[in-house]
Image (tube, rainbow, N blue to C red):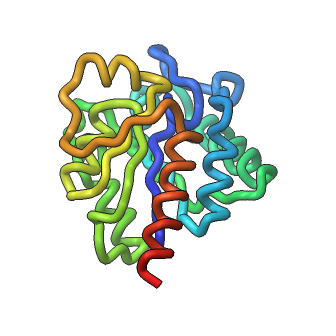
Amino acid sequence: MKIILLDRDGVINQDSDKFVKSIDEFILIPGSVDAIANLSQAGFKVVVCTNQSGLGRGLFTMEALNEMHEKLHQSVEQAGGEVDVIMFCPHTAEANCLCRKPKPGMILDICERFNVEDISRVAMIGDSIRDLQAIDNVGGIPILVKTGNGKKTLAKETLPAGTLVFDDLLAASEYIIAYVQKVTASET
């Protein structure tokens, strides 16, 4: 099974230093919905894997989070694709939980739910160092996009070895789909 993990804020939708707190603030980045639809149509299970500490801070409600995620589901479905699962960590950094990225708990949970046998073939697309560290911590493939905090991450952080870098989610998805098609063709 092919599976792809996507961070949310800054990768799929615009990020905000004040948190994305409502459906009105949930503004999709151009090309992100098409990227998800293309990955889905290419046979990938698409899993959104996101820290949402604004929930734990009381900045928005579970109802507001569900509305944002419903908007994402509907937008991707209208483009002919599917978001298979949205997993989120509601905790603040102070909670020191195992699911908040850069810790790998959420990724390990996703891989267990989807019966992933080889995590080294799982990629995570994110815009921050914690996204890259989370997947790198379990031996997966870190991919940085330059949207959201991506340019700042690229300029200020030491990226995990082997990190791939793309302008946005659409460019990353096109590379991934072409790469998997090429590998699949060479295996047959």
In the shown orientation, is residue 169 left or right of residue 71? left
User: Can you give x and y, in whole percent of width and height, for residue 74 in the image?
Assistant: 75, 49
Q: How many marks?
A: 0
Q: Residue at x 24, y 17 (%)?
A: 156
Outermost residue, front side = 186
Residue 34: in sight, yes or no? Answer: yes
Residue 55: in sight, yes or no? Answer: no
Q: Nearer the viewer, residue 188 or 67?
A: 188
Q: Residue at x 46, y 59 (%)?
A: 179
Q: Is residue 37 above or below residue 125?
A: below
Q: Nearer the viewer, residue 91 or 78?
A: 78
Q: Nearer the viewer, residue 59 or 9?
A: 9
Q: Residue at x 37, y 43 (%)?
A: 143
Q: Is residue 159 above or below residue 172?
A: above
User: Can you give x and y, in whole percent of width and height, for residue 153 in the image?
Assistant: 31, 23
Quarter of the figure with residue 45? bottom right
Q: Nearer the viewer, residue 133 or 50?
A: 133
In the shown orientation, is residue 9 left or right of residue 136? right
User: Can you give x and y, in whole percent of width and height, for residue 132 in the image?
Assistant: 29, 41
Q: Residue at x 61, y 65 (%)?
A: 42
User: Can you give x and y, in whole percent of width and height, for residue 119 in the image?
Assistant: 29, 66
